[in-house]
Amino acid sequence: MIYQGFFDEGSRARCFEHPNYHPVDLPSVAETLGEGWDEPTIDSLSEWPMLLWAHRQAVREHEWVGFTSYRQDDKVPDGLRLDRERIEALLEDYDIVTWHWAVCTRQILHPVTSEVLRTTNCPLYMQCEMTRPGINAAMAEALARTGNVVPKGWYTNCGGIFCNYWAMKNATFDAYMKWVYPVMFWIVDNWNVHPLLGRVVGSHTAGSANPGRVRYGSDIMERLVNVWQMATGASVYDALNSTPIARTLGEERLRRLHEKDNTAAAQAEE
């Protein structure tokens, strides 16, 4: 099942009528989690409550789970819809299936006329800094505070998964959530005190004059799947362009990741 997040009646109307997609009311789901988040925090967390809600489900409908948003047709061309059989077949060979793998670019401008001289690829960190100044420092701090580091690939790789448009088998999803959970909760705990994490501009609502947003906390969350993918070597398949991206993580390496997490947790309790 691919869960499709929405915020209000206007965005609910844009969700897909497809058997493999299920609309999720993000504010309502956030309230059921019992975290005590206020309305501005819920709004600014974007899809994080949906991921957390899916992770906490005692019983899941399928052996895999996926996520998208009501804005998918704005970001992904060709009216892409993925049926259950295709997702399950791809997840037999790849750890992550995405339908929004993007290669970051930047424009080189003429110093006088500002004419675009050429367009060139740029690393993920550069794209982040150009669109969200300071976000790299905020993400690095969130990772460091939870015992993680920014992988080298963040500074060299030009392609990445965007918008939380991806699917994983349940075991892989649980491994990712176990890793990302403390990072996201450090961000939420420091939402109102960190100079960047709580910064919000614009609104999600369909009728807003400025439907775009700058929300550093959830923008970091969206990019953390790339950090985890680089750190673990998880394989990625670009379903939109039918292109394999990275090598397979495999059951044995996933088992070792679980063992490493369990060992670290045991040492922390001692």
Image (tube, helix red, strand yellow):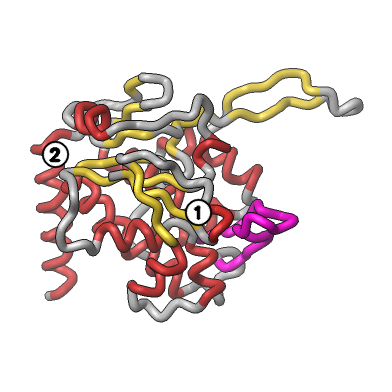
Q: Nearer the viewer, residue 27 or 144?
A: 27
Any mark on residue 145, and which?
A: none
| Residue under pointer 1 | 12
Q: Quadrant of residue 263?
A: bottom left
Magenta residues (range): 198-219
Q: Up-down: is 125 above or below 235?
A: below
Please tell me whether residue 158 belongs to the stretch shown in magenta.
no
Q: Nearer the viewer, residue 63 or 117?
A: 63
Please tell me whether residue 206 belongs to the stretch shown in magenta.
yes
Dot 1 or dot 2, earlier in sequence: 1
Q: Amino acid at mark 2?
A: Arg
Mark 1 and mark 2 in contact? Answer it, CB < 8 Å. Answer: no
Which residue sits at x=14%, y=53%? Answer: 260
Asked whether residue 196 appears in the rendered view, the answer is yes
Q: Amino acid at mark 1?
A: Arg
Left or right of 70: which side holds 105? right
